[in-house]
């Protein structure tokens, strides 16, 4: 690859992983207020898995370049951007566009990556870390001595949630398939096999009075159980609808149903709370406030990584040219952590 060539992965429509297309083109030029990041690591998150099925609720029209986040070095700075930013390793939250060797973004949207953290390590905690941090500390406000239930405790967001909850002094119950239970126990998690156990019964045996927070990426009918498992004063944070990933029909409907349940539950005369978490919430109302919060919270996550409170869970590292294999691996349910892509 020469310095003037950009490599990108294009999602042309609803395709199997082998239908992803690798294109080559010209490296973008940084416009006013922008930087061009030379990608060192991006990753496969659940969002891309939904997008290739046309199931992500606000994905752009096909074709487009997926990639929810990116970590790399600033290769160009545009007009109005301090030239000293060039050569700095940064992370950026994008929603789409990260599966490319070079990415142009607004300079105000990049967050410096501290020294001592590799690109791959940082990549595992950008979207996953910011989601976990904000749900735990800004929504549920988990405190020491509380008990939380994390669905998908071995997954990208779930594994970070588990570690951040422990760092906050909370006890963690986690759902996962049996193959991940040994690893979860080693982390101090009380595991529940969602395939073979009755989750509400198992949780009640561990926490008879209910749990202080539930983090639910599954959605569907199980969200009602999550709500009912809350102790008085507890908080449910729903942040996805994984149970509907392979469904047909409207991709917005599962989210709208979740939002409706959240509204109804919060309208009831009870001491429990429910949220549907969207990392982009508030951006349209105040871009400056959104950026400041994102920068502050992602910096907290990077600091926790430096302190060893959380560890980078890298399931596999593959080149961008092997994106189909990376997608299949991420979707297999057999790996723990994040599948990372390199240029």
Image (tube, rainbow, N blue to C red):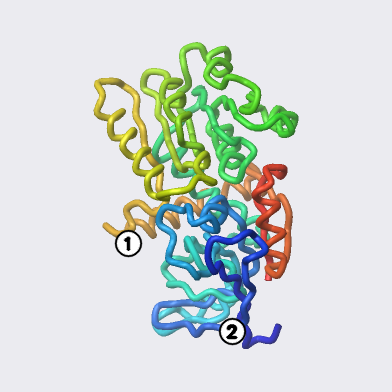
Residue at 45 percent of width and 20 percent of height:
229
Classify mark 1: helix, strand or loop.
helix
Give me the residue at 48% from left, 21% from top: 211
Is residue 47 toward the left or the right of residue 141 in the image?
A: right
Please give the residue where the numbered disc 2 appears in the rendered image. 25
179 or 101, which lies in front? Answer: 179
| Residue holding disc 1 | 287
Residue 31, given in percent of the width and then of the height, sits at 42, 83
Q: Is residue 112 visible?
A: no
Q: Residue at x 51, y 57 (%)?
A: 51
Kindly state the secondary structure of the residue where label 2 is placed.
strand
Q: Quadrant of residue 185?
A: top right
Give the position of the C terminus as an image quadrant: bottom right
Q: Position of residue 9 (x, y in %)?
A: 60, 70
Residue 220: percent from the left, percent from the top?
46, 35
Query: Quick check: 154 left or right of 222?
Result: right
Q: Which mark is residue 228?
A: none
Q: Is residue 232 above or below residue 235?
A: above
Q: Residues within 10 Å of mark 1 (few under 14, many from 20)?
A: few
Is the N terminus in the top left, top right, bottom left or bottom right quadrant? bottom right
Foreground residue, 109 or 222? Answer: 222
């Amino acid at each position: 690859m020469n310095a003037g060539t950009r490599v990108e992965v294009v999602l042309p429509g609803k395709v199997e992983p082998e239908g992803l297309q690798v294109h080559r083109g010209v490296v973008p030029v940084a416009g006013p207020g922008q930087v061009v990041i030379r990608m060192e690591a991006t990753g496969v998150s659940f969002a891309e898995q939904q997008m290739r099925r046309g199931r992500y609720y606000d994905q752009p029209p096909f074709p487009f370049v997926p990639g929810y986040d990116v970590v790399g070095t600033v290769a160009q700075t545009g007009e109005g951007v301090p030239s000293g930013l060039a050569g700095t390793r940064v992370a950026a939250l994008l929603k789409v566009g990260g599966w490319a060797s070079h990415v142009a973004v607004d300079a105000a949207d990049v967050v410096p990556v501290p020294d001592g953290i590799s690109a791959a390590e940082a990549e595992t905690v950008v979207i996953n870390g910011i989601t976990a941090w904000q749900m735990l500390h800004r929504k549920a406000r988990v405190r020491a001595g509380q008990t939380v239930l994390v669905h998908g405790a071995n997954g990208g967001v779930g594994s970070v949630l588990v570690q951040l909850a422990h760092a906050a002094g909370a006890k963690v119950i986690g759902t996962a398939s049996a193959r991940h239970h040994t690893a979860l126990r080693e982390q101090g998690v009380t595991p529940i096999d969602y395939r073979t156990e009755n989750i509400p019964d198992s949780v009640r045996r561990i926490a008879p009075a209910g749990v202080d927070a539930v983090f639910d990426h599954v959605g569907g009918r199980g969200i009602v159980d999550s709500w009912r498992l809350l102790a008085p004063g507890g908080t449910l944070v729903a942040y996805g609808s994984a149970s509907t990933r392979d469904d047909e029909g409207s991709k917005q409907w599962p989210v709208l149903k979740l939002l409706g349940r959240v509204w109804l539950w919060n309208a009831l005369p009870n001491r429990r709370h429910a949220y549907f978490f969207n990392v982009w919430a508030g951006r349209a109302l105040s871009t400056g406030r959104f950026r400041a919060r994102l920068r502050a919270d992602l910096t907290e996550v990077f600091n926790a990584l430096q302190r060893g409170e959380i560890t980078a869970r890298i399931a596999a590292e593959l080149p961008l040219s092997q994106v189909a294999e990376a997608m299949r691996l991420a979707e297999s349910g057999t790996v723990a952590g994040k599948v990372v892509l390199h240029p």
